[in-house]
Amino acid sequence: MPIAYIEDIARHEGEQVTIRGWLHNRRSSGTIHFLTVRDGTGFLQAVMSKANVEPDVFTLADHLSQESAIVVTGQVRADSRAPGGFELEVTTLQVIGESHDYPITPKEHGIDFLLDRRHLWIRSERQSAILRVRHEVVNAVRDFFNSRGFILVDTPIFTPSAAEGTTTLFPVPYFDLGTAYLTQSGQLYNEANAAALGRVYCFGPTFRAEKSKTRRHLTEFWMVEPEVAYATLDDTIELAEQLVVAVVERVLDKRSRELKVLQRDTSRLERVKTPFPRVSYDEAVKILHDRGVNFEWGNDLGGTDETVLSEQFDRPVAVHRYPAAVKAFYMEPDPERPELALCVDVLAPEGYGEIIGGSQRIADADLLLERIRQHNLPQEAFEWYLDIRRYGSVPHSGFGMGIERVVSWLCGLDHLREAIAYPRMIYRMSP
Amino acid sequence: MPIAYIEDIARHEGEQVTIRGWLHNRRSSGTIHFLTVRDGTGFLQAVMSKANVEPDVFTLADHLSQESAIVVTGQVRADSRAPGGFELEVTTLQVIGESHDYPITPKEHGIDFLLDRRHLWIRSERQSAILRVRHEVVNAVRDFFNSRGFILVDTPIFTPSAAEGTTTLFPVPYFDLGTAYLTQSGQLYNEANAAALGRVYCFGPTFRAEKSKTRRHLTEFWMVEPEVAYATLDDTIELAEQLVVAVVERVLDKRSRELKVLQRDTSRLERVKTPFPRVSYDEAVKILHDRGVNFEWGNDLGGTDETVLSEQFDRPVAVHRYPAAVKAFYMEPDPERPELALCVDVLAPEGYGEIIGGSQRIADADLLLERIRQHNLPQEAFEWYLDIRRYGSVPHSGFGMGIERVVSWLCGLDHLREAIAYPRMIYRMSP
């Protein structure tokens, strides 16, 4: 009997197929079992009538418990009442692996209980839908850059120095060489790579030893970071806009079933089109003041400020030209107002906050060195980074986009911890 | 003037375009400068005739040094003598960033000198070709799995326990939770994910604190690991074969220019077709003995043994069913000969050694527990892993493929350190 995956079931209408999966749920009457089978690609109702199967098979199904591994064979039948439009008329059933007292039942469980059982929790309809959306986001991002001539260059995880200070770094003893730090960003390497390959991106895990317990922080998260030689801040804002729109469109297109499971209001996502509103930091401060927020010019925007700002727009908003003092040392100053940095943060709508942060980078070696000193960074560790300015320096720009934040926004999640299979937080590193 | 990338130059034949890049090389006569310009996407000969440009522009080019950032404008002209078939007839030149005493000259440099300047070395024709091949390998792998219904599930980097012993782990202090270890493999998590999503893969950096200084070891390397529920050893060998062939074909198709730069003998790669020869460990031992190698049944294959074996075949060879004693604790024993594991190593030809290692995993909870105890692993740390067998256990299989080893083989490299942008080895963690 041909083995089929549930996601392809429509192609098998009228055929006899075998589905290999697990029992998600069972309802039974005296003469009929309704088995909801999941195989990792979807959920399917398998209907077993007493009249169609051997008596011992029917009895076997009487005692099947949640998450038993089962192989069912039967005919695929279109049925408009069935979720997904098809069901399986079961003729044989085989139990491959039993499951007793599966801990995650349809009742409510606390978040710690579920996170302790994350390896099982991901089997649920909701959690597996989120992971599929994440898969689509990652691939949409990669396809976006690959189709535009970008070269993936994996930047190192072990780094000898830090892009943005050392307080939030994870140190790792490294043989006889002292301490390596887990990367917080591939950007500095990206800059060297862009000088070699023109348009590059890195996409890997990044680490922040932040003691924040907020719903917007993980200690380990994935970030994509493009960097483009000869690109200005405006170029990078445009690239960021296009990326976000491409990702949203792809998820709407390919993962509508998952968004439905998540009960996501997709009309909010359908509004995400270019151009995004562009608001300078100065204008942002005005908006905050107009909305009665007590905010002092010169500060960085906090989570609440971002929420107030993003609520003014029906799509992501690009906030640019923050005061240089609250931003990273490597950002190019605005030539018209050097107290500002040529930078941009893209804030997601619906209160999801910053999903992208980027900038034009300092091109001048002397200015960069001055900034390294002002920030009390060890010059020696940055000699290689200065080299990028010593040997054929060009204007260049890039940004980073946090994958969990995007997934969280697109899925409408309350907390980043559901946007990754095995979340790592200050108080959790297992399973 | 439209800005063009060198890789697209053929599309601009006869047009005036601007190329933004760096000076790779210069030859000059009294009335003509031949400037080899690179822009990260390729190399182009830009010809500047004294008659065609302002006198000061011609003089400027007289003093241009290697890796100066330059913007050149001119007409694209087909010329069969030019490398790539096109050249640019320059009418204007602008210097964006100077470059004095660029350290990597056309003369020979030692490997440490070059690795210390890896951020610049990657600008060379050879190194950038390798990075482009790597890019293609990674994307071929991802496309392979995505097009076959696999879901990417990123497995965690911070793990509480180790898949294969703790001696080669990097420990990281983790807040108040004690020590996290950097992942050596996502496999254990993949197994849980396959039970949730059917067919999954992870693809990320992995870490081994091995003190080996061989040309086949890095402390940080990228690995792709698929895992399939309901798959047997044979299924996973077939999947591995198909993956390798898909990657080789894609690189031959899309990166012929780069392979030419690397002077790779592609006839050796063109022979890589399914099916691969499949050789049991027993047969492998016989082959070694026939070739006069002193090898005792029961040992693991060493690098030299692998080379002797792989030299018998014109394509990768799948060696299966090693003695369980030399393999990992989680491998399913061969039901016909329980002293053997249902495992496979795929050895690349031309002496490149193991590129893939995989197995069917133990499905039975009791047997798995027994193995955990035999290997003196802490049961508590593996409770979640045992859960996969407690709740609907199914046969399942998967493998890991090391990206740097594949890149190294496809590019014909002597050492893994050139197969990644910023190699990390026992004696190197910078730049």
Image (cartoon, coloured by chain):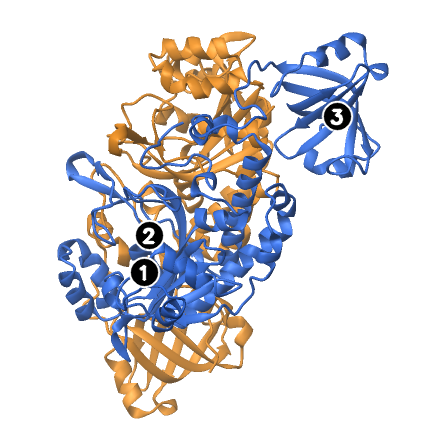
Chain colours: A orange, B blue
Looking at the rendering, which quadrant does residue A107 occupy?
A: bottom left
Disc 3 target residue: B46
Q: CA distance from mark 3 to mark 1?
A: 55 Å
Tell me which amino acid carries mark 3: Ala
Question: For the residues tagged 2 and 1, is the chain the same?
Answer: yes
Residue closest to the eye, A15 or A147: A147
Query: Which residue occupies the extreme right position in the image?
Result: B51
Residue B236 picture quarter: bottom left
**Residue at 40% from the left image edge and 50% from the top image edge:** B223
Residue B381 shows in the view:
yes
For the residue marked with disc 2, what is the amino acid? Gly
Write down the residue under mark 2.
B186
Position of residue B103 measured from the top left corner of the image (x, y, whole percent): 52, 20
- For the residues beneath circles 3 and 2, the answer to whether they share a chain is yes
x and y, in percent, of residue B60 in the image: 71, 10
The tag on residue B191 is 1
Going from N to C along the chain, the mark reached first, 2 or 1, is: 2
Task: Describe residue B223's horizontal placement relative to residue A273 as left or right.
Answer: left
Which disc number belongs to residue A356?
Answer: none
**Mark in front: 3 vs 1:** 3
Say whether residue A94 is left or right of residue B71.
left
Q: Position of residue A161 (x, y in %)?
A: 34, 24
Per the model, the C-alpha gap separating discs 2 and 1 is 9 Å
Q: Chain of mark 1?
A: B
Question: Which is in the foreground here, disc 3 or disc 2?
Answer: 3
Q: Secondary structure at mark 3?
A: strand
Q: Secondary structure at mark 2?
A: loop
Using the numbered discs, state the Cα–Cα distance from disc 3 to disc 2 in whole angstroms: 49 Å
| Badge 1 amino acid | Glu
**Earlier along the polypeptide chain: callout 3 or callout 2?**
3
